[in-house]
Image (cartoon, grey):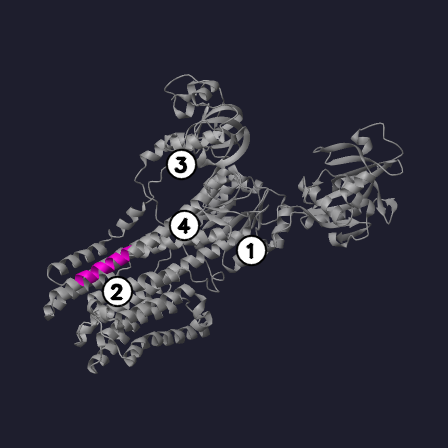
Amino acid sequence: MHWHLMEGEEVLRELASSHRGLSSQEARERLERYGPNELEETGGKTPLAMLLAQFSDFMILVLIAAAVVAGAIGEVTDSLAIATIVVLNAVTGFVQEYRAEKAVQALKKMAEPTAVVIRDRMLGSVPASQLVPGDIVLLDTGRVVPADLRLLETTHLRVDESALTGESVPAEKQARPLHGDSLPLGDRRNMAYLGTFVTYGRALGVVVATGMDTELGRIAAMLQGEGEGRTPLQKRLAGFGRTLTLAILAACIAYLVAGVVRGEAWLLMFLTAIALAVAAIPEALPAVVTITLALGAKRMTRQNALVRRLPAVETLGSVTFICSDKTGTLTLNRMVVEAVYLEGELLRESDLAGRGEEFLRALALCNDARLDSRGEVIGDPTEAALLSLAEINGFDRAEQERMFPRLAEIPFEAERKCMTTFHRSPEGRVITFTKGAAEVMVGLSSTVLVDGVRKRLDADEMHEVTEKMAREGLRVLGIGMKEWESFPGTMDPEEIESDLTLLGLVGIIDPPREEALEAVSLCRTAGIRPVMITGDHPVTAAAVARRLGILDDGGEALMTGDELEAISMEEFEARVEHVQVYARVAPEQKLKIVRALKDRGQVVAMTGDGVNDAPALKAADIGVAMGVAGTDVAKEASDMILLDDNFATIVRAVREGRRIYDNILKFLKYTMASNAGTLLAVFVAPFFALPLPLRPVQILWMNLLCDSLPGLALTVERAEEDVMTRPPVLPGEQVLSKGRAFFMLRYGMLIGALTLLLQAWAHGEGMHWQTMVFTSLLVGRMAVAMVVRSEKESLFRLGLFSNPPLLGAALLIVALQAGVVYLPFCHGVFLTEPLTLAEFALSCALFFLVLIVAEAEKAFLRRRH
């Protein structure tokens, strides 16, 4: 349908709609007919696809082939055991992936955009996914266009359509019909398309297409099959996994050939080699990473940080610079009175009790702020602060207005920088109260009120006081009055606002958040540089930054927007890492800051709330939008949304990101060290004339039990105490760096060596040696799971009960293993024999030996550090 060629009224008739909008009933019926206003997600998986995907892994396919071969040659028990383990592994993987997918969907639901529509003849907000053709939608600056619209009314509307047309300049829109069937999208000036955003003005439009029927939907249809990109950590792990897989497969083939040459049964060696390969290769790592990131993102949401893109969770651990807005993020976004100059003294706002009656009355009366029904002050933030001070000190506005009713006013004007109100006193005289910028009020005043007596005003003294207050970051206002016998015969500001009596000066400020002060300190100890970016005056910005601990007066700590504009990118890059505060900066200049920091190799988190912040948010490693004050455009461009617009929330998110990254590496250390121990025991035993320590089904059972439950339990491990007192993770850091490879090797060798000693001794003593080795290796893995919880802290200090899921997983695994050992029907499947109490105790001794070695090592590390 060529909607752009039709008159607006014709479009409405065609869609069976009107300017009054649809009814809720009609909207529901159309939603059933057209479906939700959503683009089909090609990357999503159905539950069946998730289940089938569990059988697509190369090593699982090898296992299935092994089960078929074993069954074909009559080894039915081995065949059934392998098949059972394959199925159990698939079910476990499916459940984990399904839960992760649900968590991601819940996050996407929370981030869903909204649209302002007219329904039932009333204006309201609905989720954009609920829009239907015929809905009447209102657009304004900063809002993302929620569907394809034919514009009916426009007011100075400009829309950024670069996502569709490639035009970098916003398109000017109008509502008149156009001519030409083949007009390209960029020339359809009376249309607004899904996914574009309003940069200026406002409009009224009718929805003509939703979901996959939109222009953006057509593009999405052409992109089907494109999957979601993997995170940097997933890519590193995938590369590591490929190299490891090839090495293990080569070793297993060599093991198979060597065993057959030694005269071992080829089927047994074949099945053992396959089982070893499956057990040693961490094929579940990519899935575990995705699950961990998804669940981590869900946890962050509970801390008011809504993660829109999963890679952001990982990247948070590497952040080196956090560039933050001042107002509302580092401060309360609420003006309060902090200091008062009254009767020759500079006082804190808490020291006013019983003083300054006329001054406080002026604050209450020369004011347009109001108290609402809940007793909260509403109105201009500055006036709200002044009224709050009056109310706190007993000068109720309503009562004061009954005693001193307002007769007239001269409103505030930017040129005069002051306002005046006229009031009749109880004695019948007229009093004018004037408030304005301190320097203006000092110039308009001839006297000052001190102890109820008017004295000559010393302008130099007042300017000195004003400057002192301004240096503390306060915005200073003057409050004055003038008395008249009757209502003056003029409203000329020059006459009314002259020869005033100055009642006092008041210093107001948007105070720093208390939690932001702690968060800034935490950033510094974590090796993260907090940077303040504001449009405020440099003096105010510097004062607030000093209070927060951001500014330390070192070198080129503060830079203004004019300075930033004047220098070249090369000059700026040389200085950017030393700048702590940017003042009088335009939002567009944030992009220059982000690029300069990234060019210097820094990992940057950037906050923003406006349309102009979007490019910087997109360019930053972590774009952080404000959930309360942010525009739709800023949110769409961001990786994370602060639901409380609080700087401390960013720092909490960084802490969570580091914890998640640490826990993924703990899982890797655990699984690789455990696998290395098993490999060593099985590979080396024949060289010491020992029989095969494990049967294939035992290896697979151990892999099934130990790679899932303990691994996932480790991902919920609490953050270590030093998580925010160490430098950020370097972007290029490899998974095996910082001693992790050495840890895997030495603990693998420890488990393998102790297991071989146990096998040799138990075999010589005629004990149930294979079941003992089987059990010993399994409990040894549980010991490693406990050890990796911290690099330096003792397990006894951490406490066994501080990670209940891990303790529960370990106890469950030991219980299941006891069932395999002692339940008669398991003996034929797992080729086990019931152990005596002494044999079982000896098998479990590996757990304590590994813990003793680990505790000694950690004690040494603590003393060294």
Residue that mark 3 sits on: 38
What span is colored magenta in the figure?
Answer: 78-90
| Quadrant of residue 224 within the rendered picture | top left
Q: Can residue 579 be seen in this view?
A: no
- The foreground one among 828 and 560 is 828
Spot occupied by residue 425 in the image (x, y as percentages of width and height): 86, 38
The mark found on residue 103 in the picture is: 4
Identify residue type, mark 3: Glu
Question: Of helix, strand and loop, which one carries label 1?
Answer: helix
Residue 701, labelled with which disc? Answer: 2
Please, what secondary structure does the residue beneath circle 2 have?
Answer: helix
Q: Residue at x 58, y 50 (%)?
A: 330
The image quadrant where one finds the N terminus is: top left
Asked whether 439 falls inside the magenta stretch, the response is no
**The furthest residue to the top:** 179
Disc 1 from disc 2: Cα separation: 49 Å
Vertical position of residue 328 compared to residue 797: above or below: above
**Gap between marks 3 and 1 measured at Cα:** 40 Å
The residue shown at (77%, 40%) is 365
Question: Label 2, label 3: how many angstroms apart (C-alpha)?
Answer: 44 Å
Q: Residues within 10 Å of mark 1 (few under 14, many from 20)?
A: many
- The local secondary structure at tag 3 comes to loop
Mark 4 / mark 3, whichever is N-terminal:
3
Amino acid type at mark 4 = Ala
Among numbered discs 3 and 1, the one appearing first in the sequence: 3
Residue visible at 22% across and 56% down? 59
| Position of residue 655 measured from the top left corner of the image (x, y, whole percent) | 48, 57
| Image-quadrant location for residue 563 | top right
Above/below status of 207 relative to 794: above
